[in-house]
Image: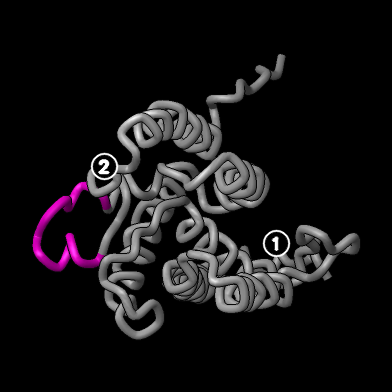
Amino acid sequence: MLRRRGFFSSATNIIIALNILFFLVAYPMLLITKGSIVDYIAIKPENILNGDYLWTFVTSMFMHGGVFHLFANMFTLFFIGNLVERIIGKKRYVWFYLISGLAASIFFILFSRIFVSDFSAYAVGASGSIFAIAGLLMILTPNLPVFLMFIPIPIKLKYAVPILLIGLWLISITGAIGIGNTAHLGGLIAGLFYGAYLKSKYPNKVMILNRYFK
């Protein structure tokens, strides 16, 4: 008899639960303290370059700027994260998720002066890791059809990810909205590199996988 898998048998779902739990605990505290504890949670280039609040490399990955930010990221993570987890395995997936999130934060710090012009800008969210997952899928399953918000037709992943990345960048510029575009780009680059590594190491498996998406 086949055993039914529970929700928390998936590492992706556990990560989603941790994000939600952390948000439910930290967000009210931020409101109560009027943001005075943000340095303890969000990644801030100025802090990191001064050697302060280094734990925010981790906490910033599990915090979000609001309910919509949390929902959009977790909704996306649920679908593409679970897919990648099944493709590369749970243990490898967890390490990939964490390391790519770290890479996204480092990228944000290194390029904050160029693209943000402010070392005091904050960043939170799982978007860096999510873009890394998308980047990996761009290499392993480029023709996977996905839906982008407000676009009612499926788009191949190899086109959807660049459209989303450029779209977010334009929104942040024209609307003066604080979006961690450099973190997104850093995560995407990390995912592309890891995807290229897996494709070169397991070419036959990748070829078989792509037979489902033409």
Please tell me which residue is depicted at 54% across the width and 27% down the height of the picture.
9
Above or below for 1 versus 187: above
- Label 2 sits on residue: 36
Please tell me which residue is depicted at 36% across the width and 36% down the height of the picture.
30
Say which quadrant the C terminus sits in: bottom right
Taking the image as shown, residue 176 lies to the left or right of residue 3, namely: left
Segment tinted magenta in the rendering: 45-56
Of residue 187 and residue 183, the one placed in the foreground of this image is 183
Above or below for 115 versus 80: below
**Which mark is in front, 2 or 1?**
2
Q: Secondary structure at mark 2?
A: loop
Q: Name the residue at the bottom extreme.
A: 114
Please tell me which residue is depicted at 80% across the width and 61% down the height of the picture.
212
Q: Secondary structure at mark 1?
A: helix
* Amino acid marked by disc 1: Leu
Is residue 51 covered in magenta? yes
The percent position of residue 148, horizontal first and vertical second, equals: 76, 61
Residue 96 figure quarter: bottom left
Taking the image as shown, residue 60 lies to the left or right of residue 172, namely: left
- Label 1 sits on residue: 209
The percent position of residue 179, horizontal first and vertical second, equals: 50, 65
